[in-house]
Amino acid sequence: MASPLEDDIFEKLKQKTDAAETEKRQQDVNAKVHAQYQKAQERLVELVDDNSTLPVTISSIRVLHATHTRREFLERIFQPLLSVNRDGPYTLSEALSDVSTATNQLNKFDIFKSPISIFIDKPDPSDPSTTPTDIAVYLSAQERSRYTIKTGTEVGHSEGNAFVNVQLRNLFGGAESLNAHGSLGTRTRSAYSVGFDAPVLSNPDFRFEVNGQASSTLKSWASHEEVLKGGTTKLKYLTEGGHRHEVGYSGIWRQVTSLAENASPTVRGDAGDSFKSSISHTWINDRRDYPLLPNRGYLMKTVAEIAGLGPLGGDVGFGKLEGETQAAVPLGSGVTFTAGLRGGLLYPLSLSSGNAPIQSRINDRFQLGGPTDVRGFRLSGLGPHDGSDAVGGDIYAAGGASLLFPIPRVGADTPLRLQAFVNGGRLLALKGKSKEGVMDSKAVASNMRRTIAALKDGLPSCAAGLGIVYAHPVARFEINFSLPLVLRAAEAGRKGLSFGVGVEFL
């Protein structure tokens, strides 16, 4: 009779033997699969080299390993390749081009590991339904993990925070995703969001998105805290020319609360609750070679929003338009010249016919100044102030130009650059506002023209400086020494070193 110790040793040896046998079987399977793949690739090379102009028909397409992806989702992508009603001859090279295009489309969904392997073979000759021109296409598409959890810390935009992000991928087998995000920070004290995203009709360039959010942000430059709760829906699509569009609706409850003891009358006047109901459209045409540190190309972007008009409801009404353009030109030897312009206006609208347009609120007005837009000024340091509070403006224009140089002994192939820059801007409140917060509707257009014309009165507030730029794949980092050159009364300049992190810089 064996002892317990012998039994334990025997059991462990048996487990090791079983594991070794399982591993060997898996290795044998992998070797067979690899051999089949290599053989298929050799056949593919032979087919392409010797028969590129021969007529073919794709008899079948099989996506291997896509166990959690719906069949009908894949059929919308590959069914056009199986059509028999083609005009004119269909050659092997054309078939391979179409298969490659469809595979690239499949890659865009971000639910499969890259690369997706393609191999082609002849169908079973014993099948009476096949013809000599038939080919069978196989795609080896290994699915990515169905969930991702990330935790970490972030520093940027004058704040730091800790976050957790959870993503559920390919939720219902059609490349849907569910994202949940939570963060705690120094300025954005708390932020929580849940978003659902899904492609429309298996098109990776046409997506539907719905989000819910709640956040609490300390706005020390205006002596208050802003609490937001609400949701948004969006349709996102990409045109064949590479233009990106977003059309959406948002319903957001806002609260200006936790006012500081020295909060200005303007901030106190906007304290309390408001509800914004708006539709928006964003258009982006980005032709830069590397957006975070472009060497050549250009960017054009517009954002339009209408709130409170007609059936939209809510208790704020405005039309808001922002535009941005940027260009980068290589000067040789790794030196690049970049220049950019931004501008925006907030046009007051009445909530219903017959009523006067209402004054904009601090929640909706523009803020300008800081390490990611007009450097050399404190965060929201430009524009109208009430005491020490930056209360924002209704019209702004800003621009900047930079020369980026490779760092000696580092080279132009690295994401490090020396920077010399000059930037400036103006932020103005709309003229003609009354003490009651309403305006004569007939005078709004005239006041808007007067305010726009005032942008060119005198020199803009501006600053110049030198710095170091590092373009990380996630964000751009800058350390700059800035010197304000033109500073208006009540505006807050910042002489000396500043640190900026972001994805959009002036």
Image (spheres, helix red, strand yellow):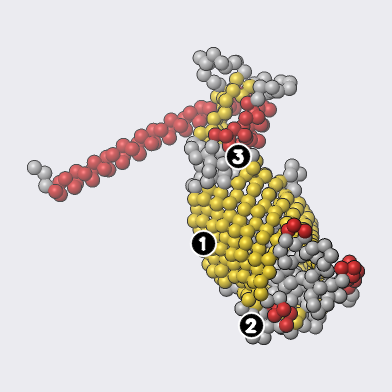
Q: Amino acid at mark 3?
A: Leu
Dot 2, crowdedness within 10 Å: few (<14), some or many (≥20)? some
Across and down, in percent, residue 35 comes to 47, 30
Mark 3 falls on what kind of element?
A: helix
Q: Visible in this render: residue 87?
A: yes
Q: Where residue 110 sits: x, y (%)?
A: 58, 46
Closest to the camera, between mark 2 and mark 1, is 2
Q: Secondary structure at mark 2?
A: loop
Above/below status of 192 relative to 138: below
Which residue position holds label 2?
260
| 179 up-or-down from 187: above or below | above
Left or right: residue 193 compared with residue 302: left
In-front residue for pair 28/274? 274
From the image, state whether disc 3 or disc 2 is nearer to you: 2
Residue 106: which numbered mark, if any?
3
For label 1, the residue is 164
Q: Residue at x 54, y 30 (%)?
A: 62
Q: Position of residue 65 (x, y in %)?
A: 49, 36
Nearest to N terminus: mark 3 or mark 2? 3
**Residue type at tag 2:** Ala
Viewer-closest of 426 and 364: 364
* First-in-chain label (2 vs 1): 1
* Dot 3 and dot 2 residues touching (CB under 8 Å): no
Quadrant (top left/top right/bottom left/bottom right) for the C terminus:
bottom right
Which amino acid, mark 1? Answer: Val
* Residue under the image location 35 percent in, 39 percent down: 23
Q: Quadrant of residue 274?
A: bottom right
Closer to the N terminus: mark 1 or mark 3? Answer: 3
